[in-house]
Amino acid sequence: MPSDMNVNLIGYRGSGKTTVARCMARMLQWQWIDTDAEVERRAGKSIADIFRLDGEQAFRDLESREIKAVGRRTRTIVALGGGAILRAVNRRVLVRSGRTVWLTASPETLLARLDQDPATTLHRPNLTAAGGLPEIREVLAAREPIYQASADLVVDTHDKRPAAVAEEIVQRLHLTREPIDPE
């Protein structure tokens, strides 16, 4: 893989995208970014508030702008929001900017991870009226074909530590670690 490309991490919330991005960035001495966090920072409010006050369309517009911006970067590990792949324009940016890795886990594993993360409730809205495991199954069923079509690589994160997932991606994409500056 060319060293001037990005690695884009996609998958359902709770799949480990942000944590794995952080680990990979440390390993490779690259930058990393979480597009959801950037949208919240630029909007000055949580994704849940954007959904509630402005609607999902407004959030998706902000998300697309952020994806376009990070698509111009290089040597960046990009943790994308779970629904970032819903828009074709976003998928085109991902293809042009680097390699895309789909992080997977079972619905039960995703729910357990989400239940352990207090930020999920505060910052992320429910995507269906059902919430919980029924929501995860419903949303995954709709998104899995798009995740699959968008991914250059699929990595199952179930029962794996984030550092192990990061190492697997680095090896499978044949990424070269930069020497650490001894300053």
Image: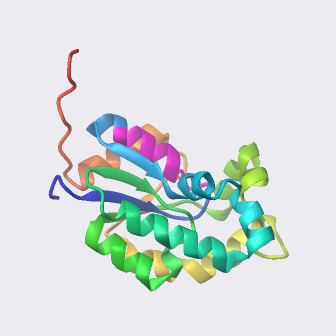
Residue 178 occupies which quadrant of the picture?
Answer: top left
Residue 58 occupies which quadrant of the picture?
Answer: bottom right
Is residue 83 something that shows in the picture? Answer: no
Question: Residue farthest to the top?
Answer: 183
Q: Residue at x 70, y 69 (%)?
A: 136
Q: Residue at x 54, y 68 (%)?
A: 63
Q: Is residue 86 above or below residue 163?
A: below
Image quarter (top left, top right, bottom left or bottom right) of the N terminus: bottom left
Q: Is residue 133 above or below residue 144?
A: above
Q: Residue at x 79, y 69 (%)?
A: 53
User: How many numbered marks are there?
Assistant: 0
The x, y position of residue 169, in whole percent, is 33, 51
Residue 109 occupies which quadrant of the picture?
Answer: bottom right
Residue 17 colored magenta? yes
The x, y position of residue 93, in whole percent, is 35, 74
From the viewer's perspective, tell me whether residue 180 is left or right of residue 159: left
The x, y position of residue 55, in whole percent, is 73, 76
Q: Is residue 168 above or below residue 12?
A: above
**Which is more toward the observer, 166 or 32?**
32
From the viewer's perspective, tell me whether residue 41 is left or right of residue 1: right
Residue 182 colored magenta? no
Q: Is residue 97 above or below residue 74?
A: below
Q: Which region of the structure is painted magenta? A: 14-25
From the viewer's perspective, tell me whether residue 83 is left or right of residue 7: right
**Which is more toward the observer, 155 or 61?**
61
Question: Residue farthest to the right?
Answer: 129
Image quarter (top left, top right, bottom left or bottom right) of the C terminus: top left
